[in-house]
Image (cartoon, rainbow, N blue to C red):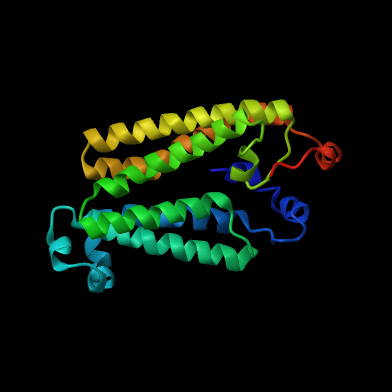
Amino acid sequence: MSEMLKQNSDLKAAEKAGGRGKPQNAWVKLTLELGPLALFFFANARPKVFEPIVAPFLPASVLSGDSAGLFIATLVLMAAVVVALIASFFLTRRIPFVPLMTAVLAVAFGALTLYLHDATFIKMKPTVLYVCFSAALFGGLAFNRPVLPILFDHAMALTEDGWRVLTLRWATFFLVLAAMNEIVWRTQATNVWVAFKFPGLFILVFLFTLAQLPFIMRNKLDEEEAEKAPEHF
């Protein structure tokens, strides 16, 4: 989500955190974030490729049903997000909040999907994720404790007014994404929803992030001002 905002700021964030983490190559980070989604998309489109790998973990009835592709892709996604999280920790010695929450929900909703043989749960996962993000952001605004710096992994320093406005924009955008996900999975075929999940949602987030860059640049603090800026959580 925050890739474009972080490419030149990882080292500074690590130093500000007291040396708790190491900077991560931007392309490696992007691969770890998008890799599981790309595998999910590919596994749904070509389930036979992954069937020999997942067969020991799924009953035959699931592998032969109409939703076999989605169930196989769900198990692949669950494994991929865990591997990506572990790889991120070994590379940086820390676990960013957004990948952690995404992984927890992917595993939880994926497990429900596979256990109950009901694809509804994995389809609802993006809705729950985005609603949680939005609620956290609106809650932070209500208590005057910006949460957005955490979601951006403290990748930049903005004025207080800048954080408030940007938080309001992202909180609203997350609600829009949640509503879109609900509409798509409830009205469209599974393959359409999978394409909406990836690369559709990624494209939407990327474009929204680009649209915020002029505002961010206008409200960005220089290094000296950033050192004096209050920490958020």
In the image shown, does 128 or 155 lie closer to the viewer? 128
Q: Is residue 43 above or below residue 158?
A: below
The residue at 29%/48% (across/down) is 121
The quarter of the displayed image where residue 168 is located: top right
Q: In the visual, does 7 lie left or right of 230? A: left
Residue 15 appears in the rendering: yes
Q: In the visual, does 72 lie left or right of 40? A: left
Numbered marks: total: 0
Residue 214 appears in the rendering: no
Q: Position of residue 157 (x, y in %)?
A: 73, 38
In the image shown, does 157 or 206 lie closer to the viewer? 157
The residue at 55%/27% (across/down) is 169
Q: Position of residue 140 (x, y in %)?
A: 60, 34
Q: Is residue 32 above or below residue 57?
A: above
Q: Position of residue 129 (x, y in %)?
A: 43, 43
In the image shown, does 132 or 48 lie closer to the viewer? 132
Q: Is residue 32 above or below residue 54?
A: above
Q: In the visual, does 40 lie left or right of 215? A: left
The residue at 36%/30% (across/down) is 179
The quarter of the displayed image where residue 50 is located: bottom left
Q: Is residue 162 above or below residue 206?
A: above
The residue at 57%/51% (across/down) is 97
Instruction: Name, please, the residue furthest toward the front.
Output: 143
Q: Position of residue 89 (x, y in %)?
A: 58, 64
Instruction: Name, please, the residue furthest toward the right.
Output: 224
The quadrant in which the C terminus is found is top right
